[in-house]
Amino acid sequence: MYTLDWKHAHIGRLHDDSLNPTPDLTAELGICTARLAGEMTAGRLPFLDLPFRREMEEGIQNLLPRLQHFKHMVILGIGGSALGTRALQKAFFPQQDRFGHSGPWVWILDNVDADELSAIMTTLNPAETLIVTISKSGGTIETLSQYFIIREWMLKCFPETWREHFIFVTDAHSGFLRQEAEREGIPSLSVPDNLGGRYSVISAVGMLPAAFMGLPWQTFLDGVQSVNTQLVYNPGSTEALREHPAWQLANWCSDLYLKDYSQLIFFSYIPAWACFGQWFGQLWAESLGKNGKGTMPLPAIGVTDQHSLQQMFLDGPKDKGCIQLYCSEIPQYLRYPMDIPETWSWLRGKAFSELLQAETLGAAAALAHHNVPLVRLRVPQADMYAAGEVMGLLMATTVLTGLILDINPLDQPAVELGKRLACSRLGSTNYPEEAAILNEFLTR
């Protein structure tokens, strides 16, 4: 079970109520309880109760025989369709990035990169390659562009059987990929209704690749569900919400914003979990950066970024709070030799992992010493269950922070403008307003 350490959470301006008193959230607690219950009843928070889990599990189980035919899974997806999967692969399947690995491999194409796409098509054996195309809307321009090109590659290689090399993960009812799946008979899994991309790692978006890698993906889901049990089974209870760690963390995060802390550091001191910071960055920024509100997420990796970013964290502007993620149980199978130089004699015989533990503690103490508000998030073991707990906690915290600050944490109205402008630039006539914006930008 994860724990939260609050000892140094209320320092700096969070300790000084003379500047801007910490708000009494009693009223907000009642309002958020009612809104949370209403949203869950309406099915708009499926990442809390996972109502789609049984259907998804059956769908993935049915596809396992197909997955076992391939050595390579190429994922076409961007943003939430890639970040959660990358976090799980780097954390729990790092062997694919090491010398001597013989498969399977997961390759994630999450950018408009001709070199990378070309390399996939020229180096992978197409007979051993499965393409998983992921887009909730079915119309993500970056993903569809990759699909059109890689489909042509497969068509040339296997004119009659190319469809056997594709799986779609998309909306259950609408969008181009859904139409394509039905037209071509391509197997597909659904992204549940109301599950935005940044929350979608818990769906087939993340769990299908996890199953391909042989990870205990159902254990991960157990971890996600365990976090929010008391909210799901007591949806109208203010007491259940008041006692929930996500509510407490959301209170702290909203207080940071109200006390003019504009940035939130997510400092992961579990090296294999480094990519969790990127996943959290999208979750937080896309959910809460609205109406002139929100705090900027800053993913950081311990101890790497102690040597690059921490100077700014400690001695730069006092506009940052920090969540430090760490693990209390680290394998101790490597030890310092006994014959190291006398200058370093105090290391003799110690476990190599003790350095990481000491660095973790040292970084936390340094942040607190410099009055950076700090919450420490500890997991006892860095396993799939704990990963599910952490992601489940952070998703719930994000939603509750939005409710406290009167921000809709489920939409992303500003994200699509750049994409529509790009489509207009390429010749689409569907966006006359965007065409005018682009013309003004180019001619001003």
Image: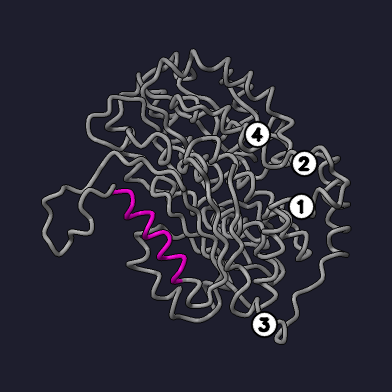
Q: Residue at x 58, y 14 (%)?
A: 62
Residue 289 x %, y % = 65, 64
Q: Are marks 4 and 3 in contact (CB under 8 Å)?
A: no
Marks 4 and 3, how far apart in space?
A: 45 Å
Residue picked out by circle 2? 230
Q: Are marks 2 and 1 in contact (CB under 8 Å)?
A: yes
Please give the range of residues in magenta. Answer: 352-366
Of callouts 2 and 1, the N-terminal one = 2
Q: Which mark is residue 191?
A: 4
Q: Residue at x 15, y 64 (%)?
A: 343
**369 or 422: nearer the eye?**
369
Looking at the rendered structure, the kind of residue marked 4 is: Val
* Dot 4 alpha-carbon crowd within 10 angstroms: few under 14, some 14 to 19, many 20 or more: many
Residue picked out by circle 3? 16
Of callouts 2 and 4, the N-terminal one = 4
Residue picked out by circle 1? 243
